[in-house]
Image: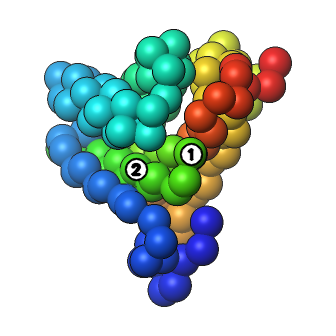
Amino acid sequence: MSQIDGEPAADQDFVEVRLPAAGAYLSVLRTATAGLAARLDFTLDEIEDLRIAVDEACAILLQQAVPGSVLSCVFRLVDDSLEVTVSAPTTDGHAPSRDTFAWTVLSALAGKVSSAVDDDKTVSISLYKQRGAGPGPA
């Protein structure tokens, strides 16, 4: 993804959703995920996989999110791909463990999965799915 000073490049569309870091609001992100994936002509199975993956990524973050904080979700649409990055300020600033069932689910549903921790303990999980690419790595 090409970016200049943290801003999306002109040749890509992006949508950012910010909402309270609480499970009650995750349906908003699932709906946004489905709508944006449909815009890219993802299959119904690919859309459902992304919805579940976004939900799982958020659940991982909400376990350590600072109470009363904001969960941010940025969707980047590039050609036939969708990158979804969810992030939240956390109490301990630990990256999600890659040897858990939740991480296995993310990897199976999304083509590529990565995580990052900023200096201020904000943890991010990024999912990258290409239309027609099939399931992610086992």
Closer to the chain start, of discs 1 and 2, is: 2
* Quadrant of residue 86 within the rendered picture: top left
- Amino acid on which the number 2 mark rests in the picture: Phe
Q: CA distance from mark 1 to mark 2?
A: 10 Å
* Quadrant of residue 8 within the rendered picture: bottom left
Q: Position of residue 95 (x, y in %)?
A: 62, 44
Q: Nearer the viewer, residue 84 or 34?
A: 34
- The residue shown at (60%, 74%) is 2
Secondary structure, mark 1, is strand
Q: Nearer the viewer, residue 89 or 138?
A: 138
Secondary structure, mark 2, is strand
Q: Is residue 108 visible?
A: yes
- Amino acid on which the number 1 mark rests in the picture: Ser
Q: Nearer the viewer, residue 15 or 80?
A: 80
Label 2: how many Cα within 10 Å (few below 14, some 14–19, many 20+): many
Q: Which residue is mark 1?
A: 81
Q: Which residue is mark 2?
A: 75
Label 1: how many Cα within 10 Å (few below 14, some 14–19, many 20+): some
- The residue shown at (52%, 56%) is 78
Whether residue 28 sits left or right of residue 98 in the image: it is left
The answer to whether 27 is drawn above or below residue 32 in the figure is above
Label annotation for residue 124: none
Q: Quadrant of the C terminus?
A: top right
